[in-house]
Image: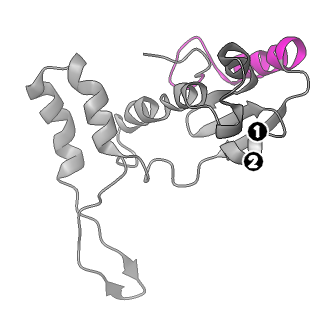
Amino acid sequence: MYYNAQGGFREVRGTLDLIEICSILRKHHCSNSTLAFLDIKYAYDSVDRSYIWRTLQPYLDPALLDLLKNPFNKVQIGVILGNAKSSCFPPKTGVLQGSILSSFLYFIYINQLPSLLRDHPLPHEAEKDPVDFALSVNCLLYDDDVVLIASSAQLPAIL
């Protein structure tokens, strides 16, 4: 379930390991590649929970999955501005800030990114050899920080 270049949420892998991976990739495989460092704004608030539940469904007993969903589905939020407060409403996306489960659930969500980049080539890249394309686009992940590795021609389309 873990993508190899996912450095967050793992005991034996951290930022220094990702820096080393990035260095090796640039030196030996993609010397003319361009790096885009992304810090995903509102990452935890924008997660599609239905994707997470579908991903977990084959691995969990239905009762356990329902137990996991319950705190996220029962949330009501409101906005306070000065002395005024909006009426409460259920958020349609996101995982709970501060929940011990949220980092793990976000990991499940972001872990799809590397395979999406590999499996869905850009239209002008579709005629290239698939192996060549797989090496030409990659990413490194650490929680909500992402490094995209691609050629300078590919990067704007990926972003």
Would you call the spot at circle 2 few (<14 residues within 10 Å), some (14-19), or many (20 or more)?
few
Which three-letter amino acid code belongs to the residue tagged 1? Gln
Q: Which residue is mark 1?
A: 154
Where is residue 72 drawn, in percent x and y? 24, 47
Residue 32 spot, x, y in % from top left = 91, 27
The correct choice, above or below, for 136 with respect to 42 in the image is above
| CB contact under 8 Å: marks 2 and 1 | yes
The residue located at (17%, 53%) in the rendering is: 74
**Could you say which quadrant of the image residue 19 lies in?**
top right
- Looking at the image, residue 15 lies above or below residue 85: above
What amino acid type is highlighted by mark number 2?
Pro
- The quadrant holding residue 153 is top right
Of 42 and 51, the residue lying toward us: 51
**Chief SS of the magenta region:** helix
27 falls in the magenta region: yes
Residue 156, which numbered label?
2
Q: Is residue 48 magenta?
A: no
Dot 2 falls on a residue whose secondary structure is helix
Q: Residue lying furthest front in this view?
A: 127
What span is in magenta?
7-29
Identity of the residue drawn at 58% across and 14% down: 4
Q: In the visual, does 14 lie left or right of 49?
A: right
Residue 143 placed where, x, y %? Answer: 55, 34
Give SS at disc 1.
loop
Q: Residue at x 59, y 48 (%)?
A: 40
- Give the crowd class for mark 1: few <14, some 14-19, many >=20 residues within 10 Å: some
Asked if residue 130 lies left or right of residue 79, the reply is right
Name the residue located 31 percent from the left edge and 28 percent from the top edge. 55
Whole-number angstrom distance, CA of label 2 to CA of label 1 = 6 Å
Total numbered labels placed on residues in the image? 2
Question: In the drawing, does residue 118 fall left or right of residue 70?
Answer: right
